[in-house]
Image: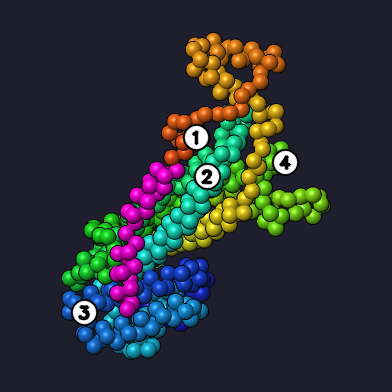
Amino acid sequence: MSKLWQKTTNVDKLVENFTVGRDRELDNQMAAFDVLGSLAHTTMLQSIGLMESDDLALVQKELKSIYADIINGDFEIQEGVEDVHSQVEMLLTQRIGDAGKKIHSGRSRNDQVLVDLKLFFRHQLKEVVESVQKLFTLLLELSEKHKEVLLPGYTHLQVAMPSSFGLWFGAYAESLVDDLEMVLAAWKITNKNPLGSAAGYGSSFPLNRTLTTQLLGFDSLNYNVVYAQMGRGKTERIIAQALSTIAATIAKMAMDQCLYLSQNFAFVSYPENLTTGSSIMPHKKNPDVWEIMRGKCNRLQALPNDVAMMTTNLPSGYHRELQLLKELLFPAFTDIQDCLSMAAFMLQNVTVNTNILDDPKYSYLFSVEEVNRAVLNGTPFRDAYKKIGLDIEQGNFNPDKNINHTHEGSIGNLLNEQISASMNKVLISFDFNKVEEAIAKLVG
Ligand code: ARG
């Protein structure tokens, strides 16, 4: 099959396969967004007199029908077709003839892939935000539910001070708030329209980039056409940073889970059908879900580096290896979504051990409590510290296990409402509604 750019010569098959790579498979995920880009571009072409109204009507009707096919799963990039941009233009031309050949005025595939990726990433980021929000809500519920249940706190992995399930679950909830601040930064940078940079240097046609910005629901545009093209790689790197921030939170939580599930800790448990067995040891109930999650999330933390290694020192302008970034970013969204939903699924079924601190090995958790009690009764801190230290050495340490932590963010004063309010503040900064409305109008 011939290429959009083919004049006379057939490109070598080996070269074709090597350069097309995994585009046919990965571009499928961008297909709906490619059509949205074309709907906006053609509306704009008509508005500046580069497309007749009749042609526009024909083109848009067909684009909308292709869009519906994509949404219904009835779309594929055929063997021999280079990428999604070629597939859509080819379908249009097959179905409506010459009008289809007019849509590419004033743009380039470099331009198309830029806008497709921004729209695709925007969509994916929205889904990530929604999944983070679900996990956040669950974690805060668990924090409230188990706020009275104490847990050993560790420093150096040595028994340190009393903690609680209220603190533990709430900590991960609050971590997700800051992670969403990173996602918000990624969202803001993604939500700017690159369309109109053409091959990377603009066009001699009087393109109306403000119009396509509005039609696609972008917040603003990448003004400078060279910078718009430079956004390829940069956008990916920033998104990778945001995803890896969430991944770090999940990986840490997964590690805690593996530790707390171990018989040596036995702080939490899960129904047997959520654990996995061993082929040799009949007693095993392994935390494989958390381990796979830890691995996927640790791998995601390498993503910013992978993107940076591939794009560092590329000069400005388009380069074909930018195409390979899709191989890094697209599966990353699947991984983070799987991890977020599995974390929520597991946590819905967690049981916490309510008697952990009855075990005498945790008595020393209360050493600081005893010191503080003596301080409140008038003993200077250093003297109290010494006395309790000696009691411990001489085997005379019998702590009172009632604790009274009242300051902000401590066991007895979790401030979960404030954590919830800070989450809501981040969430309202994502202007999802504006985007949804624009897209609905474009395909309506
Ligand atoms: N598949 C290409 C990419 O992702 C599309 C742009 C092709 N542009 C070009 N000049 N060959 O980058």
Give the foreground label among 3 and 4: 4
Q: Are marks 3 and 4 in contact (CB under 8 Å)?
A: no
Query: Which residue is found at the position 22% from the left and 69% from the top?
Result: 211
According to the picture, the residue beneath numbered tag 1 turns out to be 412
Q: Earlier in the sequence, mark 3 or mark 1?
A: 3
| Dot 1 alpha-carbon crowd within 10 angstroms: few under 14, some 14 to 19, many 20 or more | some
Q: Amino acid at mark 2?
A: Ser
Numbered marks: total: 4
According to the picture, the residue beneath numbered tag 3 turns out to be 46
According to the picture, the residue beneath numbered tag 2 turns out to be 143
Residue 283 lies, in percent from the top left, at 79, 49
Closer to us: 2 or 8:
2
| Dot 4 alpha-carbon crowd within 10 angstroms: few under 14, some 14 to 19, many 20 or more | few
Q: Earlier in the sequence, mark 3 or mark 4?
A: 3
How far apart are labels 2 and 4 at the CA level?
23 Å
How far apart are labels 2 and 3 at the CA level?
56 Å
Q: Earlier in the sequence, mark 1 or mark 2?
A: 2
Query: Which residue is found at the position 58% from the left and 12% from the top?
Result: 386
Q: Earlier in the sequence, mark 1 or mark 4?
A: 4
Q: Please provide the residue range marked out in magenta.
A: 416-444
Q: Earlier in the sequence, mark 2 or mark 3?
A: 3
Relative to 371, residue 324 above or below: below
Give the foreground label among 2 and 4: 2
According to the picture, the residue beneath numbered tag 4 turns out to be 263
Residue 326 lies, in percent from the top left, at 46, 62
Q: Earlier in the sequence, mark 2 or mark 4?
A: 2
How far apart are labels 3 and 1 at the CA level?
64 Å
